[in-house]
Amino acid sequence: MDINIYLLAGLILAVLIILHLTLRLIHVRQQLSFIKEALEDLKNGNLNRRVLAGENDLTKQICYDINDIAISNQLRLIQQRQAEQAYKRLMTSLSHDVKTPLASLVGYLEAIENGLVTGTERDEYIHVAADKANRLKDFVTALFEWVKLDAGEQIFHFEIFDINELSRNIIAEWIPLLESAGLHYEIEIPEQECAVRIDPNAYTRIINNLLQNIIIHSEADHMTLCIAEDAQRAKITVSDNGKGISPDDLPHIFERMYQCDHSRFAKGSGLGLSIARELVSAHKGKITAASTPGTETSFTVLLPKAL
Amino acid sequence: MNDFVIEAKQLTKIYGKQKAVNCVNLHVRKGRVYGLLGRNGAGKTTIMKLILGLTSVTSGEVAVFGQNIRGREKRVFPRIGAIIETPGFYPNLTGTENLEIFAKLRGTAAPGAVKNALEIVGLPCKDKKLFGKYSLGMKQRLGIANAILHDPELLILDEPTNGLDPIGIAEVRDFIKRLSSEQGKTILISSHILSEIALLADDIGIIDCGVLLEESSMNELKKRNSKYILLQVSDVPKTSLILEREFHTKDYSVQDEHTLRIYDTSLNMGEINKFLVMQNITVTSSGLCNDTLEDYFKKITGGEGIA
């Protein structure tokens, strides 16, 4: 009698276990079919496909690993595509940036050649044409510099310099230019030495580009250059009181070829700030911009000090 | 294989006697942000519900991932993340607990999914605050976190910026943009704010009174809506000379051998034409393009505009 009860209990238990395992098996099979479907999709190039797994699923780790692979592949693919697009955009804007000044240059030269202008007007035409040709040359130079930087082919010669001394020398050359542009200036460079490991040519280029930017674009009548340091970094701030940069434009100003107005070649090359950023990052530094239009616009370069 | 993640054909929904959605043909392409723009009550939410199969279709059909969703919910829903109107959360649990429930129900694509999702929308993880005590903005953020919890391929977001403050709106816009550009997600988003959609969408669908009035890419729209004078002439260099000498503008660009764009729209087009013809330059066409997006939407929705 007793034995029968035990047998019955054992049987019920066995049936329950079998039932449980069967259900589990069905669940796993279903999961596998989901995984198979997802893999098929991934194979066809849909790298956004994910396989979802519950907390206690046997297949959890497999699912997570599949997702991981898909995500990293997707990331690589997107980066590649973005680089391609950026390159294409660059080529398009480049061809426009060359076409416009070239067309007007040809216009001036034709007028001279065909004798449409004479005397002082002719001289003026030649002057304007030469000016345009020079601007084109500068643009092409800036472009090559940028391409070199972008491709990582620029070779830097880093040495330890007193950044204050170096900046004083750079700014001294700018003073006549600032004055002829009608800019009041204020320069605060500390007397004591501040040693920074830099490539002096690159540093000069950074400061030149920032100052040039003010003269060409800001319409300001006052500018300041100020150098300060803390324990780790030297901080160079160039600011002006010009028309400023709108919040919409601000995030993009360091992108190559970004200019706030459409008639891009009217002034500048659209490469200056982009080059400055590349150079600063080659120094393991940082460049940022802040602007309150009409009040103050400032560019800040942070460079790590030599310790 | 076609590239549409969502494709609606002649989609119609009738509530009682009212046609809420009328013969809509909608195409959401893979990896793009599709903005559905319309006034309150235009039928945006209904379209989203029809896509998700949350309400029955009166006539027409809608395919998600190339197939009808009916009967395949279990396979398709894990690939979609959505917020439609207010999401249903338990008011007596915290945000984290709420998401953990959904994570358990749906399964996850990677470990730490809840923490990740909260981080992306900027809500604290393991916070003690109950959902019932959340502000509207926080509720909305939690809704978005829930939508992206399982890393879906397709996001359907119905007015995701409702109830957010301006900074919150910018944050949400930012991460939607990132989801699209960095992860290649397909996103369908609805809004009644033109500027919002203009900043975010790659493609745009304008809906009014249940009818999809226009569907096109944002680039196409922007091209149609920038402000410039388009000139087609026989001699570009001569024309550019005339523009610079006689009309004193450098605000133009050369598009190709015969086409110029003048961005200074204050110039008198008639005068320019007259002058060019007098100089023996043939003007094939000239026209002023100065519709703004806003004007365009007003035109297309029958004068009332979308605000």
Image (cartoon, coloured by chain):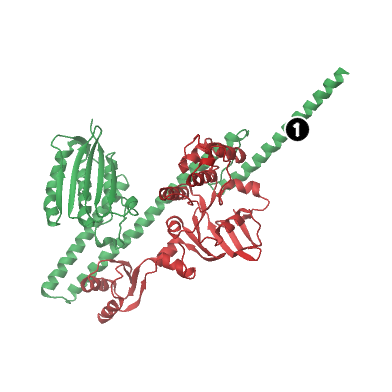
Q: Provide the residue designation for mark 1.
A: A19
- Rendering coords of residue B43 (x, y %): 56, 61
Q: Quadrant of residue A180?
A: bottom left
Instruction: Tell me the chain of label 1.
Output: A
Left or right side of A292 for A178: left
**Is residue A155 among the parts visible in the rendering?**
no
Residue that lies at the very extreme toward the front in this rendered image: B133
Q: Is residue B244 above or below residue A186?
A: below
Q: How many marks?
A: 1
Q: Which chain is green?
A: A
**Is residue A137 among the parts visible in the rendering?**
yes
Residue that lies at the very extreme toward the right in this rendered image: A1
Using the image as rendered, state which of residue A269 and residue B110 is in the foreground.
B110
Using the image as rendered, state which of residue B185 and residue A74 is in the foreground.
B185
Residue name at image x 36 percent, y 74 percent: B287
Residue name at image x 61 percent, y 53 percent: B52
Using the image as rendered, state which of residue B187 and residue A114 is in the foreground.
B187
Screen quadrant of the C terminus of chain A: top left
Q: Is residue A281 above or below residue B192?
A: above
Q: Is residue B246 above or below residue A40?
A: below
Under mark 1, the amino acid is Leu
- Rendering coords of residue B234 (x, y %): 31, 76
Q: What colour do you see for chain B?
A: red
Q: Secondary structure at mark 1?
A: helix
Q: Quadrant of residue B268?
A: bottom left
